[in-house]
Image (cartoon, helix red, strand yellow):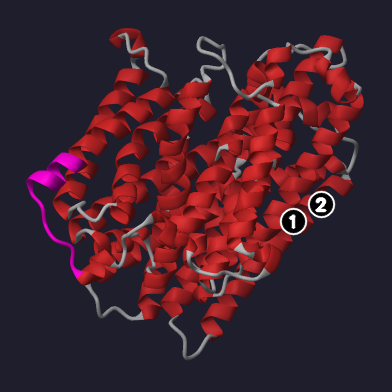
Amino acid sequence: MNVVLNVYDWVAIGLYLAVVIGIGCWAGLRQRRSKGVDQGREYFLAGGHLNWVVIGLALFSTNISTVHLVGLAEEGYKNGLACGNFEWMAPFTLIILSFFFAPFYIRTRVATLPDFLEMRFSRGCRNWLAVISMLAAVVVHISFALFAGATVLHGLFDVPMMTSLIGLGVLIAFYTSVGGLMAVVAAESVQTIVLLVGAVCLTGFGLHEVGGWSGMAAHVDPVKLTVMRPAGDASNMPWYAILLGYPIIGIWYWCTDQTIVQRVLGAKDENHARVGPLFAGFLKILPVFLLVLPGLICAALVHQGKLPELKDTKDAFTVMVANLLPTGLKGVMAAALMAAIMGAVSGAMNSIATLFCYDLYKQLKPDVSDKKLVLIGRVVTWIGMILAIAWASQLGKFASVFQGIQTVICYVAPSLTVVFLAGVFWKRATARAAFSTLASGFGLGVTVFFLDFFKASTGWNVNFMMASFYLACVCGVILVVVSLVWPKPLTDKQAALVWGNPMDALRAPGWPGLGNYKVLAAILVVVMVTLYSIFR
């Protein structure tokens, strides 16, 4: 279903693109004119100047891509609010990032998470994580976001898929390579605002058309208004799988994935690094109402006869935009689509450049100049984008983009989550055990992925979230056994990266008043428990 845009729509799109490209050029010029500073950290980590507002907005924007806009609307249409668990469980893992991981990341002033893993364990662990993180950024973060964005642009405006992939890729690689992380997070702040405005408009017009919340509730199955589902539910997301499986993928994604955590690494200080993720936690409340709910509204409008029956559930978002938004706002929504694509992809591109330069190239040539390192980072950004476009062109073979991403994450995350948790909480965890866990966990994850992917032939019938939990248990056993069989005392430097007692993480006083990270975390927990009680 193609959408006809008028001059006001194109003006909105043009203004948005001009602002984003301008931000990239401004950040690049600022970085070039910086004197007496570490230009490498300026480019890759924004010089350590990021405040909590920018960090929170950037975390949210990097996380929300067109996969969410399209995928969550489709899930909302089919299964209601069940997939909202992936949004509402995130605040709890962001609290873990704020309390237990961010302080170590800032105190050590690491440029990358593999750098942190080397400090805690070994060089081998660092190299392994760097390579896996780069692959994950290309295969998961960038390719799926580009593919989903190109799919929507094709559906809305009949732009050829490859034209969309290449056009979006070139634009994002340009402002990312020119301005580095400062360009990324500055653009992400704008993108988050545009995305939220577009989503609010779509939800608002949808609720008005359907007759408000009561009108929607009267025309959908009541179970679709709940988030906690029993075993055998059509959503394939029973409550126990969410409770056991989400922490495994959530801790990896929000606490140990370079693409996401790089914003925290660029924080001004420990307080900004703690409060930024908590701000993002509050923002993560919104997608259930702004991204999942439109799909549910679409289903109600179809039942009311106000929207045509969908030929493909993937069209839920497209149909809402085409039929509900008035002239002018279609351009805002198109800009929101671009914002979602750019926010996720640009962050991943910058993380790939950072990982390659700091964890691979600089280890081989430690005397490399900052100027050359930045140049290499720009080249790697373009190479990564080319590879991502090539892989994205093949993603049409997956039955569901959103489920595909979740499945891949569930099989990548377990070993990484176990190693990082053991690293900061268990002093007896050794380098040999960490590397053994990373290598064997990756092998097991790949094996289970193929068993699941070819389930028609293999007969595999394990929920993907539960599979993630089981893999984490196996990885935990491997790490504990190897650590105990081949013990090795920690050095003083390594011991400083382990919490002697989890409560030690709360001893930092923080800012006074409402801005205190402990107060904000308590409020966030209360809000989330209340929401789960209402929509259980």
Secondary structure category for the residue under label 1: helix
In the picture shown, does residue 7 fall above or below 3? below
Relative to residue 432, is residue 90 drawn left or right? right
Marks 1/2: CA distance? Answer: 6 Å
In the picture shown, does residue 179 fall above or below 285? below
Q: Residue furthest bottom?
A: 36
Q: Residue at 69% x, 52% y: name it.
A: 192
Q: Quadrant of residue 59?
A: bottom right
Q: Amino acid at mark 2?
A: Ala
Report x, y in % for residue 39: 45, 80
Q: Residue at 70% x, 41% y: name it.
A: 286
Relative to residue 439, is residue 391 drawn left or right? right
> What's drawn in magenta, residue-wise?
480-491
Report x, y in % for residue 270: 51, 70
Q: Name the residue tied to disc 2.
A: 12
Q: Name the residue tied to disc 1.
A: 16
Report x, y in % for residue 260: 49, 53
Residues tagged 1 and 2 counted as in contact (Cβ below 8 A): yes
- 296 in magenta: no
Front residue of this view, candidates 489 and 464 = 489
Q: Residue at 18% x, 56% y: name it.
A: 124
Secondary structure category for the residue under label 2: helix
- Would you call the spot at circle 1 few (<14 residues within 10 Å), some (14-19), or many (20 or more)? many
Front residue of this view, candidates 479 and 182 = 479
Relative to residue 534, is residue 63 drawn left or right? left
Relative to residue 398, is residue 186 drawn left or right? right
Q: Is residue 207 visible in this depiction of the protein? A: yes
Quarter in which the C terminus is drawn? top right
Quarter in which the N terminus is drawn? top right
Q: Is residue 179 visible in this depiction of the protein? A: no
